[in-house]
Image (cartoon, rainbow, N blue to C red):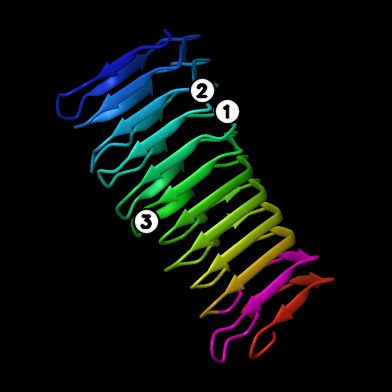
Amino acid sequence: VARSTFAAVGAGQEALLLSGGDYGLYTDSWFLGPAGQAVYIDNNSNWNTIRRSTMNANSATLGALELDFADHNIIQDSYIENLGGNRAVFYKVGSDTNTLPQHTALASTGTNDTMRIDRSSGNSISNSFFVNLGQGFGLGLERSANQANVTASTFIAGSYGVWSWGNNHHNTFSDLHIQTTFEAGLSFNESSSNTVSNVRVYSSSKALDIEISTGNSLTQLYAYSTTDPGAWVARDHSTTISLSTFVSVGVGMRGLVLYQSSVTTVLNSYVQGPVGL
């Protein structure tokens, strides 16, 4: 399918539904769901590709693009937007090894994530731009969203920029720019054995927030906060930090706080604040 327009004007309906369909190719097209979804891929629909296309939705209850038990799909060089208050992209349970590469622009509003990955593993995001126009999140990984690779992307959000909560492990975050207003830029909670490298975080809240996690490794991280600690590490075990910079300019704040944490290693790093560590 190429150079076509698909519109679903019914409430809660999809402009494109792939259910049990494999190896489809959709290019240079527009998928419009003004009262529902742009694209819904489910029921073991695998190895499909959407390229150079636009997906628009305006829903408070549905994502513009949703994958549900769908693997090995590629969404490339596309623009995905939901201005109705829900997510732009939602990978539901069992949506594994999907790829979102090369300058895919995402936009949403409201208090939801721009993109959420839930109980799905091995997904890849690269060279993408995520913006949340409301007070929501950028990218959220939850409930055993494991082995994701997020690289060379930008996240701008009112709340958390990138968060990984709920028994997630072995995710990789590299070459990222994260900017938030109300909550932490990069947040791990019950999230272990993740790797962070060459990430810059700017926040009006904590730039980095790690809680109840184990064995995370961070290198070449720049974390800057205007009001809170540059980094907050609490009830954590075996975090390793190297070649990193933590700065807070908040009144009476510390550049880095270690609270009830054990076996934390900080090497070759710079910590600055009205109070240092």
Q: Of callouts 3 and 1, which one flags the residue occurring earlier in the amino acid sequence?
A: 1
| Front disc: 3 or 1 | 3
Q: Is 179 covered by the magenta stretch?
A: no
Q: Tell me how far mark 3 sits from mark 1, CA to CA.
A: 25 Å
The type of residue carrying mark 3 is Gly
Percent x, y of residue 164: 53, 53
Is there CB contact under 8 Å for labels 3 and 1? no
Q: Secondary structure at mark 1?
A: loop
Q: Of callouts 2 and 1, which one flags the residue occurring earlier in the amino acid sequence?
A: 2
Is there CB contact under 8 Å for labels 2 and 1? yes
Q: How many dots with numbers?
A: 3
Residue holding disc 2: 71
The type of residue carrying mark 2 is Asp
State which quarter of the image contains the C terminus: bottom right
Percent x, y of residue 84: 25, 43
Q: Residue at x 45, y 17 (%)?
A: 28
Mark 1 crowdedness (10 Å alpha carbons): few <14, some 14-19, many ≥20: many
The disc at residue 136 is 3
Q: Of callouts 3 and 2, which one flags the residue occurring earlier in the amino acid sequence?
A: 2
Camera-side residue: 228 or 226? 226
Q: Residue at x 38, y 21 (%)?
A: 42
Percent x, y of residue 171: 63, 46
- Give the residues drawn in magenta, as a range: 229-257
Mark 3 crowdedness (10 Å alpha carbons): few <14, some 14-19, many ≥20: many
Q: Secondary structure at mark 3?
A: loop
Report which quarter residue 235 is drawn in. Answer: bottom right
Percent x, y of residue 191: 58, 55
Residue holding disc 1: 97
Q: Tell me how far mark 3 sits from mark 2, CA to CA.
A: 27 Å
| Front disc: 3 or 2 | 3
The type of residue carrying mark 1 is Thr
Left of 163 or right of it: where is 172? right
